[in-house]
Image (cartoon, rainbow, N blue to C red):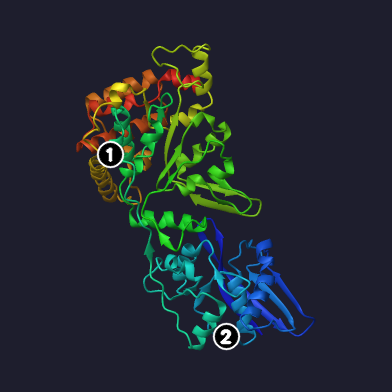
Amino acid sequence: MVSRVTTVAFQGVDAVRVDVQVHVAPGMPAFTIVGLADKAVAESRERIRAALTASGLALPARRITVNLAPADLPKEGSHYDLPIALGLMAAIGALPADALEEFLVLGELALDGTISQVAGVLPAAIAANAQGKGLVCPRDCGSEAAWADAEMAILAPMSLIAIANHFKGTQVLSRPEPRRGDSPADLPDLADVKGQEMAKRALEIAAAGGHNLLMVGPPGSGKSMLARRLPSILPALAPRELLEISMIASIAGLIADGRLSDRRPFRAPHHSASMAALVGGGLRARPGEISLAHNGVLFLDELPEFNPAVLDSLRQPLETGDVVIARANHRVTYPARFQLIAAMNPCRCGLAGTPGFTCRRGDRCAGDYRARLSGPLIDRIDLNVEVGAVSAADLQRPPPAEGSAVVAARVAAARGVQSARFAALGIPEVLTNATVPSRVIEEIARPDRSAGQLLRDAAEAMRLSARGYHRVLRVARTLADLDGAETINRLHIAEALAYRPTEERVANAA
C-alpha cells in the first residue's frame, strides 16, 4: 500500500510542493528515504521510530520506502519528520487513508512524540492556501500560520497522539488565532539628540523618501545615536510589506511564538560580518542581513572597517532590490529592498578636520581611509552629511522641542503623497521616491526652468553619473514632497546637490 502526504521544500521565500510517498511492503525489515534528501532528512528515520514508539505504535517488520517527489529537487531541513510519520501511520492503518488529502503538513518530531517548531510555516501556509488545502503544523507555529488566511483550515497539534485523536473524532483541535508581537513603546527619540541640526534634517529626508544615507564625523559626534533613532520616525508597515518581512523572518526562524511584528526591521551587523552573513548563502542558502532588513534599515557602523569585497557585494542589491544566491544545482532569490544607513570616521585616527588637531600623516590618513570605499558604492548613496563634533555648550542646552513624533508626522505625510502618486501612475508596488524607476522619476520630478539650469550646470561641474543625476532628482522630489510642493524649484535642487559627495571625495574613493 502507498500513502501520500503533501509538504513543501523551500527555495528562498517560495514553497515548492513535495509529495511524500510511503510504501510498506513484505520483505526484510528496512526503512529507506529516497529523493535527494540531506542529512537532516535522513536522520528523521530515528526520530520517527522513537516518536511512534512513544505514541504507542511500532514500525511493522516490513520493508518501508519513503520517496520525496520530485526526486531531483534537493530536500533540506527537519520539517519532513511529521509528513513522513503521518504517511507511515496512514499506511499501517493508524490514521484514515483519506484524512490527510486536504492538508499540507510540516513539523519536526521529538523523541517523545511531541511536535517541535520549524522555520518557514508562514510561506508554507500561503502555499497551502494557494493550493486550496489546509495546514498541519506544530502548535507553537499555529498563530503564525493563521495569518495566511482567516478561512483556511489549520491544525496545530502538540503531538502525534493529538492529531490521531483529532482524525478519530475523540479530541477535536481548535483553529489557532493570529497573534501580533508587542510593539516596543520606548523607541529612542530624536529629542535626545542635541545639536546636529543638519544631520537630523538629512535623517528626515532619508526617512521620507527611503534614501540611503552616509554620515561622516569624528568619534562621539552622535552618528550611531542618530541612526538608531531612525525607526522612531519611519511610517508604519503596509500590509504587503508586513507579509514580505514576515515571510523572510519565518524562513530564517526568527518568529517567536508565532507572533508577527509590525515594526520595520533594523539590522546592525558588526563590521567583521562575512559576505555570506551580509548577502546570504551558506550551506543551505539562508537569507543574509540585507534580506532580513527588507522594507527596513540596514545600519553599517564603521563602514570602512568592513571588508571591501563585502561592501561591494551590496552594489547590485541596492539597485535591483533582491539578491540571487546561485548554487551548482539551484538558484535562490531573496528580496532585499533595504535602506542603507552608514556611519564612518573621517580618517583612521578619527579626528581629521577637527579644530586644534593635526594628524602626523596629514591628508594621506583621510585619503587612505576613504579609499576603502569604492566609487560605485558611494555613487549609490543619496545623502552624504558631515556630522561635526558636539561642543559642551550644545550639551548644556535644553532638549530640542521637536521630537520624533513631530518629525514622524511630516514623514508620514510625505510618504502618503508618494503612495498616492505612484498608485495614480499604475505602479502601486512602488512606495518611495528612492525606488521609483528612472523613466518615471524624470516624469514626476521635472524641475522648473531655473532649477533645471542649475541641475545641468552642477551635473557638468560635479561630473555626475547618470545614476547620480537621477538620485539628485529623487532627493529633490522628496524635498518637494516634504514642503507640499508640486513643482521642484531651485532650492530643492540646490539642497539635493549639497548632499552629493564632492568630486574630490569620489576621486579619493575610486
Residue 108 lies in quadrant:
bottom right
Q: Is residue 160 left or right of residue 72?
A: left
Which numbered marker is on residue 423?
A: none
Residue ID at (58%, 73%): 82
Label 2 neighbourhood size at 10 Å, few (<14), some (14-19), many (20+)? many
- The kind of residue on which mark 1 rests is Ile
Label 1 neighbourhood size at 10 Å, few (<14), some (14-19), many (20+)? some
Q: Is residue 241 visible?
A: yes
Residue ID at (34%, 37%): 206
Q: Nearer the viewer, residue 177 or 240?
A: 177
Q: Position of residue 381 (x, y in %)?
A: 41, 32
- Which mark's residue is nearer the viewer, 2 or 1? 2
Residue 310 lies in quadrant:
top right
- The relative height of residue 322 versus residue 177 in the rendered view (above or below) is above
Q: Nearer the viewer, residue 428 or 230?
A: 230
Placement of the N terminus among the 4 image quadrants: bottom right
Q: Circle 1 is placed at which residue position?
A: 444
Q: Nearer the viewer, residue 418 or 411?
A: 411
Residue ID at (57%, 48%): 325
